[in-house]
Amino acid sequence: MRVLGISGSPRRGQTTERLVQRVLGAIKGHETEFVSLAGLNIKPCGACLGCTGDNTCVLTDDMEALRPLLERADAYVIGAPNYFSMLNAQMHALMERWFQFRHRGGEAVRGKLGVAIGVGGSDPNAPAVNIETFFRYNGIECIGRVTAMGANPCYVCGHGITCRDGAVFARLAPGQTEITDEMVPDLSKQPEVIARALRIGQLLSQRLSGASPPAT
Ligand SMILES: Cc1cc2nc3c(=O)[nH]c(=O)nc-3n(C[C@H](O)[C@H](O)[C@H](O)COP(=O)(O)O)c2cc1C
């Protein structure tokens, strides 16, 4: 069996990507692949209905190379950052393009397993909920959610201390004049999240090996 991990963050090596990789790293006995959407050109769905005849999108961009990976995967580990209380646009564009798989009994993604990963500067749950909804729409069974706090760009933009609109300002203690390392969220400071990623990866491995879903 094969697991495809996808990070929707435009930033390489940040929390979303690292958390997706943590789940993939816990997969045992199955193959894994990883794709970052950073730098990829994936257009949104144009609603042209060009895919309704043969379940193949007619747009030409990086989705063409991604399509076989999506088709051959048996499970998806999908992670996205929170941008304005929803998953970010790059991941949304990718999801819109799954419209091509769903016409007239299309079976390319239906019946597979999924893990939803959300990252946010203050609310990591919103994108995970979006991903779970997306899985449901596509007939993919979500076996678990992993969420982590990520570092808002305001920590490194250079104006974090003084910008009253930024994510840092509200968290400064009275009189604080610099951003300290302790303030900046990082996956290494969230051992409970890393442990959960490991557990979900192990659970996904077991499910792919034929284990029954846990009783609810
Ligand atoms: C355009 C933009 C909008 C954001 N909006 C939110 C938000 O509404 N809620 C939140 O919790 N974090 C928000 N963030 C913070 C990101 O979720 C945070 O930086 C996260 O770590 C990004 O994931 P990454 O580190 O994997 O790139 C926003 C960041 C950007 C760049």
Image (cartoon, rainbow, N blue to C red):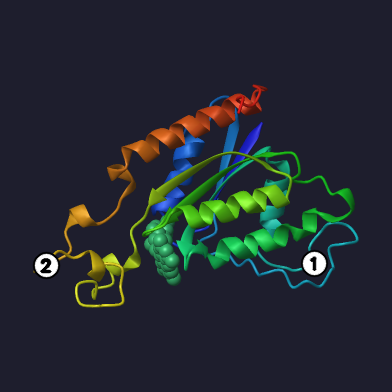
For mark 1, does the 10 Å Cα neighbourhood hold few (<14), some (14 to 19), or many (20 or more) residues? few
Identified at 85% across, 68% down, the residue is 50
Looking at the rendered structure, the secondary structure element under dot 2 is loop
Q: Which quarter of the rendered image does ligand 1 occupy?
A: bottom left
Q: Where is residue 84 in the image (x, y as percent from the top left)?
A: 47, 68
Q: Where is residue 17 in the image (x, y as percent from the top left)?
A: 45, 50
Is 148 above or below relative to 40? above
Instruction: Name the disc covering residue 100, or none.
Output: none
Q: Does the residue labelled 2 lie within 8 Å of ligand 1?
A: no
Q: Which of marks 1 and 2 is in front?
A: 2
Relative to the observer, which residue lies in front, 21 or 120?
120
Instruction: Name the disc covering residue 174, or none.
Output: 2
Looking at the rendered structure, the secondary structure element under dot 1 is loop
Q: Can residue 44 be seen in this view?
A: yes
Identified at 8% across, 69% down, the residue is 175
Relative to the observer, which residue lies in front, 60 or 197?
197
Q: Is residue 7 visible?
A: no
Is 215 above or below relative to 177? above
Residue 106 falls left or right of residue 94: right
Q: What residue type is labelled 1?
A: Val
Q: Where is residue 195 in the image (x, y as percent from the top left)?
A: 39, 33
- For label 1, the residue is 58
- Name, please, the residue furthest toward the front: 216
Residue 99 falls left or right of residue 2: right
